[in-house]
Amino acid sequence: MKSKLLAFCLLVTLAAQGQMLNDSPFDANVAHPKYTQGKGPKVLFDKGHYNFIVDMGLAKPLMDVATADGYQVRVDSMKFTKAYLAPYKMLVIFPAMPFKFGSKSQVTDEITFTPDELTALHDWVSEGGSLIMFDEHAPIDKSVTPLFNTFGIQLSIGIVSDSLNYETKFTIPNKETLLKFTRSNGLLNTDHPITQGEKTGEQINNIMGYGGGGLTGAGYTNLFKLSPSATIKKYSGSAPSGTANSQGLAGKFGKGKVVALGDCNGFTAMYVMMKSVKFSAGMQVADYDWKQFALNTLHWLSI
């Protein structure tokens, strides 16, 4: 087990080596779809900014869940403009980079989104669009900082760790990066529609983060609260910087809505292979409520 979870925390290395794969037994079925099949809101998954989770096919489980819930899903790789975004209700931006993932060891000051793209995206959300965007631990956090800043959200640089609120059943190095947000430890905000759900049985009780970055956003609801014992540590050669109070934010932005998450792995359904070791992480792991959280997030962003 020690080698299994240590391997998972090495997200950059694993992805670069192609050792993160979709878990084929994952059930994307939705028992009670929110929309009639193919009649729900149009959802765009960005593939135009070296979004390696999309490029590697690891976003497919989320796309399948959204499709099963009635949403009209499309993947496209065009640059953001007002005309391009206009047909869609929702946009999903998995971690974005200025170059192909794994081709360089560090992100510097290279441009991921052009100023014109960020302006178009800002205006689209302000006028009623819904955005879900994902941060990640260093070095990816640097590449998405301008995107998050566009919506008034600041990022830390490094990886979030918590010496008190982590998944204690794993005895591994870096175990403090497996953050727990639960009803029992008080770090899961239970007073938001996303965590409450729309129907009986849709409430969120237990979330575990898989590393990731830290967020701060005035005016947003803090869904995944970082405790006073949480710190930002060095990761992947990047010196830690900044402070954070969250790994999950949700709020209105103009006439639109934004959900920002510090870690993308919960919205996948993958297994990780390393030296013949296999383990699962994401929406299919029964111990955590990621699949329902993803559905609740889509529902809230649709309203």
Image: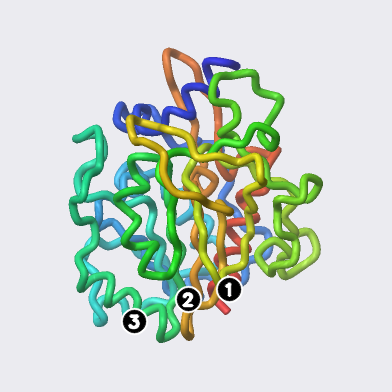
Q: In this view, does 268 lie above or below 258?
A: above
Q: Distance between the residues labelled 1 and 3?
A: 27 Å
Q: In this view, does 251 lie to the left or right of 134?
A: right
Is 45 situated left or right of 178 in this image? left
Amino acid, disc 3: Asp
Rendered image: mark on residue 238: none
Which of the two discs, 3 and 2, sits closer to the camera? 3
Residue visible at 65% across and 40% down? 229
- Secondary structure beneath label 3: helix
Q: Earlier in the sequence, mark 2 or mark 1?
A: 1
Separation (CA) of disc 2 from disc 1? 9 Å
User: Between residues 245 and 183, which one lies in front from this camera angle?
Assistant: 245
User: Are the residues flagged by discs 3 and 2 in contact, CB closer than 8 Å?
Assistant: no
Between discs 1 and 3, the one toward the N terminus: 1
Q: Nearer the viewer, mark 1 or mark 3?
A: 3
Which residue in the protein does label 2 denote? 41
Q: Earlier in the sequence, mark 3 or mark 2?
A: 2
- Which residue is the site of mark 3? 123
Secondary structure under tag 1 reads loop
Q: Which residue is drawn at 60% across and 60% down?
A: 295
Q: Which residue is painted at 58% across and 42% down in the image?
A: 209
Q: In this view, does 87 lie above or below 186?
A: below
Q: Position of residue 261 (x, y in %)?
A: 50, 55
Q: Disc 2, disc 1: CB below 8 Å? A: yes
Task: Judge from the rendering whether residue 8 lies leftward or rightward of residue 32; answer left or right.
Answer: left
Judging by the rendered image, the residue that carries numbered circle 1 is 35
